[in-house]
Amino acid sequence: MSIYADRLKALRSECKTRGLDGYVVPLTDEHMSEYVGAYAQRLPWLTGFTGSAGNAAITMDKAAVFIDGRYTIQAAAELDAALFEHHLFDELPLLTWLADNLAEGAAVGYDPELATVAWEADARNAFARKSIRLVAVETNPLDAIWTDRPAEPLAATLPHALEHAGRTAAEKRADIAAKLREDGADAAVITMLDSIAWAFNIRGTDVDNTPVAHAFAVLRADESAALYIAPEKVTDDLRDHLGNGVEIVARNEFYPALQAMGKADQKVLVDRNTNNAKVFKTLEDAGATLVEGADPCILPKAIKNSTEQEGSRQAHIRDGAAVSEFLCWLAHEAPKGELDEMKAVDALWAFREKQGMLRDKSFDTISGAGPNGAIVHYRVSPETNRPIKDGELYLVDSGGQYLDGTTDITRTIVVGNPTAEMKDRFTRVLKGHIALSTTRFPKGTSGMALDAIARRPIWEAGLDYDHGTGHGVGSFLAVHEGPQRIAKFGSAVALQPGMILSNEPGYYKEDAYGIRIENLVLVRTVAEETERDMYEFENLTWAPIDRNLVDTAIMADNEISWLNDYHKSVFETVSPLVDDTTKTWLEAATAPISR
């Protein structure tokens, strides 16, 4: 039996002991995080699926993993089909699958620290037709069988300097306190790690690629706060940074503190989309009055202040120099036929390390050669490592965590000569990228209203891509940040000046190649006077776009002008920071194109 068969058998045995007929395994932690620490990687441990989003459902005789369209190819490659089905969650939802595969009156377990109350309500509705019971477990059964589960990290939590944050934590708490008083709440429970990092101007190393520290927080209407964090993570510098307005409490005292708030009959702001279900239940059972609303840190965190905006600009200039040096190196090394995906990842990191203020990657680099580039969130490993071959496309999506900003850039490169189809698809992706980059839109416009602008050139050829066009990006924080987003669905939040988003249309041909062009952009107010308040995008990312893949025959004149202007700016912006070899290469890589 494989290790995954053994683990599945052990989980079923544990569930049977607890009187459960099924169990739900999400890929998240108690903070509802997208990226989680090693201690919370329950889904990959159980199934072998290493994508960054997914859930599993286990019954006594079946098991299935549920993913979105980004992971179709990856799930097929990583999951043992004899053990796990895999389904797109929008075609066959997990809850529907469970209801279909369980008997009347069955019991389904879940960990309330890894679920929201919105999910609980959906589950009860889905299970009602068969009287299936939803059971909140006291302890997670996976943790009982995961005998070598990593411990939670205890590295020191660090102050984030005012020169990068732009506003003091006390100023932020004052604004939030005013909002709480306006909403009639005594306090707000904050559990999202990037919200806590932003509110207290702290950073950490507890999650790979995201500079956050494991903690919970309560922000109060009187401008005071409590930070629930492991004592081992607290230094004298951190105490001095937090000041007298912040009470530092052991992390394991968080839920007892919620009980005390309830017993004191407090009115507590909670967010059904970010606070876990155990937070709600603890407060409700203790008698608190729940005031439901959005995490009060999310929107102000997304709207970068002037210091954060300038920091992002500077981080992107340094990052652009690193990426340009990498692309120059790639142009010289790839034709030799000895380069592979892993060597490229190492080289790119080495070029970034030369830049100042770098602290980490912003996510694991996607380094996809040929057909691996068609796997949207591909992660290279020794088992999948592929040569970068002549006549193929190479897609590299990467980013850095700098003290003054978070970067995320994708470039698609051809080694040798591209096919006509490659050029057509690349140019359509580029046309969509340009269309979105140059769009002006009125105040109140959501990202959902802009998504089709980037897709139109792809749609015109009867094609599409199965991911959003743009995600929010933090300031030395999460590379995927809400609430701003550019996507077909679920992005009704209006874009506002100061928000940073990605612009990344793509195209993916299974078993052949992938194409994506990604820059980060900053929402800003249109400078000239207009009848309505209008916004536009300021480009932040500076690195060449492969001119060898551009088919000028299907480019409009204004699109060619945009590309030439962009490349002129790339050269002017990053050439002073690169070595002489790169500067010579960059001059050619950014030269104007014409029909």
Image (cartoon, rainbow, N blue to C red):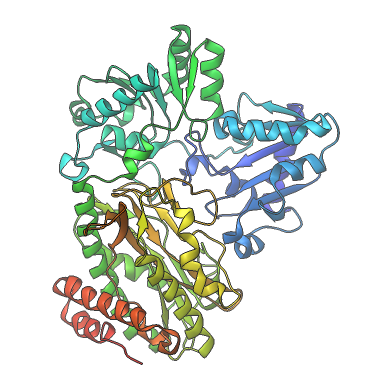
- Corner quadrant of residue 301: top left
Residue at position x 17%, y 39% in the image? 162
Q: How many marks?
A: 0
- The image position of residue 66, as x and y in percent, is 66, 51
Q: Is residue 516 left or right of residue 437?
A: right
Whether residue 393 is situated above or below residue 94 in the rendered picture: below
Residue at position x 21%, y 59% in the image? 528
- Corner quadrant of residue 189: top left
Foreground: 438 or 75? 438
Residue at position x 51%, y 17% in the image? 283
- The image position of residue 478, as x and y in percent, is 37, 47
- The image position of residue 164, as x and y in percent, is 19, 45
- The image position of residue 462, as x and y in percent, is 61, 75
Foreground: 289 or 138? 289
Foreground: 312 or 401? 312
Whether residue 486 is situated above or below residue 269 in the rendered picture: below
Q: What quarter of the picture does the C terminus occupy? A: bottom left
Q: Is residue 274 visible?
A: yes
Whether residue 429 is situated above or below residue 483 in the rendered picture: below
Whether residue 126 is situated above or below residue 459 in the rendered picture: above
Residue at position x 32%, y 37% in the image? 197
Q: Is residue 333 left or right of residue 372?
A: left
Q: Is residue 110 visible?
A: no
